[in-house]
Image (cartoon, rainbow, N blue to C red):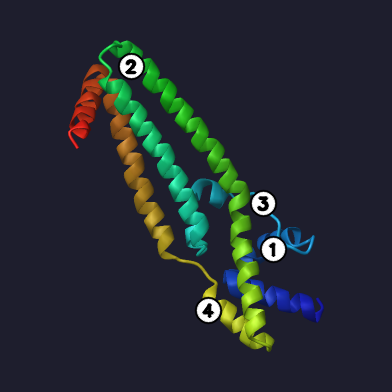
């Protein structure tokens, strides 16, 4: 390893603070900067696929996390609006509502799955893009390699607390989904009536 390669490795290690991840991001860095200017490229991450917005938040890539959060909210609002609309529609039967709800929900799952694939493949790029931008700023400000590496270590890293939040949130979501699914299967008519009541209450606001 020559001096330049050693420096690049030290900077990336300082940014990631996990030596086991250096090879993954080093390959992504090389591909993203091959043409000189950073360009978006695909690098699959199961962490990003399953973690969604938590992955960039864990890696302090806040803009990407905020964008994913906004898109997920848009999906959720559409699902809520669609369910509320058909639940309050008196011109269709309960059987038709069940078919409609199932269709909408499956479409929602399909869109969410496609979006998660996008996150799984492209979210790592936004992490390495943050590294590229941060590296450029640090190198412009400091001359010595030791100062650059130390500064990168200060601004890089990850949020360990994100992992604990993920555990709690996923547990709550899974428990809630199981309760809703059980209620829908156990008594579909009562479930539809409950949706109607929720829709009526929301219309008062």
- Distance from disc 2 to disc 1, alpha carbons, whole Å, reads 51 Å
What x and y, as percent, mark residue 3? Answer: 79, 81
What x and y, as percent, mark residue 162? Answer: 42, 60
| Visible residue check, residue 19 | no
Q: Quadrant of residue 132?
A: bottom right
What x and y, as percent, mark residue 185? Answer: 31, 21
What residue is pinned by disc 1? 23
Return the disc, 3 or 2, that comes first in the chain's sequence: 3
User: Which of pointers 3 and 2 indicates the residue nearer the eye?
Assistant: 2
The reply to whether the C-beta atoms of the residues labelled 1 and 3 are less than 8 Å apart is no
The reply to whether the C-beta atoms of the residues labelled 4 and 3 are less than 8 Å apart is no
- Distance from disc 3 to disc 2, alpha carbons, whole Å, reads 41 Å
What residue is pinned by disc 3? 43
> Callout 2: 10 Å neighbours few (<14), some, many (20+)?
some
What residue is pinned by disc 2? 97
The reply to whether the C-beta atoms of the residues labelled 3 and 2 are less than 8 Å apart is no
Camera-side residue of 42 and 25: 42
- Distance from disc 4 to disc 3, alpha carbons, whole Å, reads 26 Å
Return the disc, 2 or 1, that comes first in the chain's sequence: 1
Note whether 6 is above or below 24 in the view shown.
Answer: below
Q: Residue at x 29, y 31 (%)?
A: 180
- Helix, strand or loop for disc 2: helix
Return the disc, 4 or 3, that comes first in the chain's sequence: 3
> Callout 3: 10 Å neighbours few (<14), some, many (20+)?
some
Return the disc, 4 or 2, that comes first in the chain's sequence: 2
Q: Quadrant of residue 127?
A: bottom right
Return the disc, 1 or 3, that comes first in the chain's sequence: 1
What residue is pinned by disc 4? 154
- Distance from disc 4 to disc 1, alpha carbons, whole Å, reads 21 Å
């Amino acid at each position: 390893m020559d001096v330049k390669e050693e420096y690049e490795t030290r900077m990336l290690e300082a940014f990631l603070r996990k030596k086991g991840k250096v090879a993954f991001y080093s390959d992504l860095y090389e591909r993203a900067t091959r043409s000189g200017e950073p360009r978006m490229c695909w690098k699959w991450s199961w962490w990003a696929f399953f973690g969604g917005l938590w992955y960039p938040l864990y890696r302090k890539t806040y803009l990407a996390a905020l964008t994913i959060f906004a898109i997920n909210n848009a999906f959720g609002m559409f699902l809520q609006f669609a369910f509320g609309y058909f639940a309050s529609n008196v011109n269709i039967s309960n059987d038709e509502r069940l078919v409609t709800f199932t269709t909408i929900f499956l479409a929602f799952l399909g869109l969410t799955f496609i979006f998660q694939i996008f996150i799984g493949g492209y979210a790592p790029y936004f992490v390495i893009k943050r590294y590229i931008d941060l590296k450029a700023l640090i190198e412009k400000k400091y001359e010595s390699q030791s100062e650059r590496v130390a500064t990168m270590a200060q601004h890089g890293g990850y949020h360990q607390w994100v992992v604990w939040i993920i555990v709690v949130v996923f547990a709550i979501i899974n428990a809630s989904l199981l309760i809703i699914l059980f209620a829908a299967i156990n008594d579909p008519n009562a479930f539809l009536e409950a949706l109607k009541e929720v829709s009526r209450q929301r219309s008062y606001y």
